[in-house]
Amino acid sequence: MKRHILLLIILSTSIFFITSCSDSKYPGYELSDSGVNYRFYNQSDDTVKAEIGDYVTVNMKFGLSDTVIFDSEMMNEELSFPISNHTFKGDLYDALQMMSVGDSMSFVVVADSFYLQTGRMPKIPDFVEPGELLYYDVAVKKIENKEEYQQSVLMRQQEKYKLERSKLLEYIRQNEITTLPQASGLYYIETKEGRGIKPDTGDVCTIRLEVSDLSGRLLYSNMDTEIPTLEVTYGEEFDTKGFMQGMGMMRKGGKSKLIVPSPIGVGKLGMQGVEGFTTLIYKVSLEDIKQKSDK
């Protein structure tokens, strides 16, 4: 009797293996029950698989047979995102649910499905042929539930803010700046005293402006007189809160240097090609003020 039971277990296991790991129509790949056409490069000893609702941090590259469309190694940040229900059978989310931390895999999908169903585009891009294959290479670095992910994000943000703060204090020291910051964190340094009025809400300010980061990398400048001046309505959203606060402290004809930390500047996410947790340096020349009452 025991021998019959053991034989049934062996047969059942063999049938499961055969049906859950069949040949794919793509050479060199296997087909999973979930529809993933895959090939593992490496499988770790970790048996915990990613599940729907988990956040995964991955290295990922995908593209056509002769074109790389995306490569996470070109990003400044780690690529992390939640696993959702699949958008079509055998998509990225199905593939990730087969993986554990330390696993790396290649899998293939029809590009049409990716663009039309996952990307929800009205049509496939012109550079993609109908039915063309899209190849993924994915390595899983981390799997976290929602609470763990949120805690990780908070810790990374705290570390980035500490680093920004350290760089700012070093900049202050190296440049022998003795001006104390405003309550907001803004450093307002007047380089030329103005003699006119200060801007009021709704006034249009004509300015020349230079923006850089602490390293001296120039982000924008119209200080060259051949470049037109900017007209900025005081009190309306423009660039950063720190810039607007600083401009409100100036008088017509004055010049100032504004040091704007990220909490009143680019914030956590960054803006206009500037990474989050970056301190900005503004050099501002307030050339004219057209008062709201004059309009």
Image (cartoon, rainbow, N blue to C red):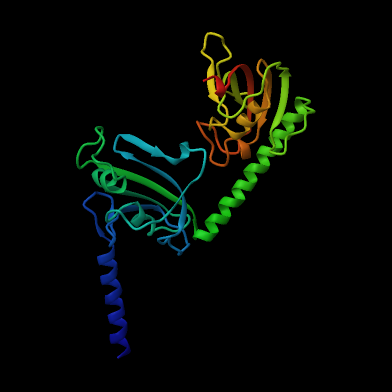
Give left or right: position of 216 versus 191.
left
Relative to residue 245, is residue 233 drawn left or right? left
Q: Nearer the viewer, residue 225 or 24?
A: 225
> Which residue of the protein is positioned furthest toward the left in this rendering?
130
Residue 39 visible somewhere in the drawing: yes
Q: Nearer the viewer, residue 140 or 272?
A: 272
| Left or right, 276 with reference to 6 | right
- x%, y% of residue 167? 69, 34
Residue at the (57%, 27%) spot, across then down: 234
The single residue placed furthest to the front in the displayed view is: 293
Vertical arrangement, residue 257 with respect to residue 168, above or below? above
Query: Residue 201: x percent and y percent?
Result: 58, 29
Residue 215 in view, yes or no: no
Name the residue located 24 percent from the left edge and 49 percent from the top edge. Answer: 27
Q: Residue 178 in the image: x percent, y percent?
A: 80, 28
Point 48% across, 38% down: residue? 75
Residue 168 falls in which quadrant of the image? top right
Residue 126, x across and y down, in percent: 24, 32
Q: Quadrant of residue 33?
A: bottom left
Residue drawn 28% across the image and 76% down it: 12
* 248 versus 124 height, above or below: above
Q: Quadrant of residue 125?
A: top left
Nearer to me, 109 or 236: 236
